[in-house]
Amino acid sequence: HAKAHGRNTFRFYTREMNTQVADRLQLENRLRRALEQDELFLLFQPQYDIHSQALIGCEVLLRWQDPVEGLIMPGRFIPIAEDSGLIVPLGRWVLREACRQMARWRAQGLPLPKIAVNVSARQLARLDFIDEVRDALQESRLPGDCLEIEVTESTLMEDADLASRQLAMLKAMGVRLSVDDFGTGYSSLAYLKRFAPDTIKIDRSFVCDLPGDSEDAAIVSAIIHLARALGMSTLAEGVETVEQCDFLRQLGCGGIQGYLLGRPQDASAIARQLALPLGS
Ligand code: C2E
Ligand code: MG
Ligand code: MG
Ligand code: MG
């Protein structure tokens, strides 16, 4: 309580808050410039079938190479982009760039089934988002089923009716849907039924203490059974050990993504992997 500690403490808080606001504003301005000056780039993290170990897709993860500060991670700038609305042009760029890269891999004859792009609530809420997706696919001559949209539970809940209409249009284009970070939000079963995603991504926080943590094991097992009963596939995020992978396979999980099998990497590293015969 600032008041209990006297006026100096109160002034201290105020100054600190001002600094925070200024920092955010500064970062927002730099981010706007970063988009114009090509300081953003994409990494791709492979997603595998847990049984065949075949590459089933890649998640697209945004990075910012700042000339002064160096590499800036999305955890730091995505929230600012979302608050400021910058996420709209930024997300449009990610979508186009990801589709272009997918087209390049396909032109090289590399068999990657799909790319998964993270989409924020503010993007999905825009009526022209559907056109942006259609344009990005058409520009790269890609069929809709090359693309998966990853949204979180909270994104679906923000304006469920609008999200529902938007996602139905994407579905009609063949675009797939996955629910990201599942289990960390409201995890409404009614929403799961309503939005019928193709894939449920089991959040890393339930995976990291497997197989030892019996509560996490119960939660993950329940998600996998529920998904299967609803005809949805599952993909576990953040798999870092062989033990986690083996355990998830026993539980019936369909896909895995994590440092064990592949870190987020650049497009040429993905191409090299795709060019290798399976198992090598
Ligand atoms: P996410 O969509 O849940 O992405 C998974 C995050 O987990 C990525 O962090 C990835 O690098 C990290 N990760 C993957 N495997 C492992 C593992 O085995 N262990 C650990 N400890 N971490 C792992 P990253 O790249 O820092 O991205 C963080 C978040 O930023 C993403 O979470 C997503 O919500 C957001 N994000 C990233 N790119 C975009 C984008 O283009 N648009 C939007 N709207 N959000 C993005
Ligand atoms: Mg994601
Ligand atoms: Mg996630
Ligand atoms: Mg996340």
Image (cartoon, rainbow, N blue to C red):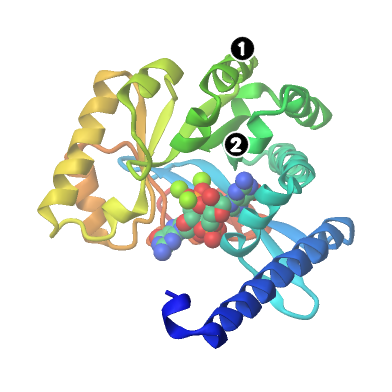
x and y percent of residue 7 in the render? 55, 83
Q: Which residue is mark 2?
A: 121
x and y percent of residue 30 in the render? 81, 66
Query: The C terminus is located in which quarter?
Result: bottom left
x and y percent of residue 184 in the render? 35, 45
Residue at the image point whose x is 76% and y is 72% from the top: 66
Residue nearest the viewer, comparing 11 with 88: 11
Characterize the local packing of mark 1: few (<14), some (14-19) or many (20 or more) Cα atoms within 10 angstroms: few
Q: Secondary structure at mark 1?
A: helix
Residue at the limit of the structure toward the left, as seen here: 214
Residues at circles 1 and 2 in contact by the CB criterion of under 8 Å: no
Q: Which residue is mark 1?
A: 172
In primary-sequence order, the first of circles 1 and 2 is: 2
The type of residue carrying mark 1 is Ala
Q: How far is mark 1 from mark 2, CA to CA?
A: 20 Å
Q: Of the numbered discs in the image, which one, if any, rests on residue 215?
A: none
Residue at the image point whose x is 73% and y is 58% from the top: 41
Residue at the image point whose x is 77% and y is 31% from the top: 136
When the figure is inspected, residue 217 is found, relative to residue 106, above or below; the finding is: below
Q: Secondary structure at mark 2?
A: helix
The type of residue carrying mark 2 is Ala
Q: Is residue 39 left or right of residue 125?
A: right
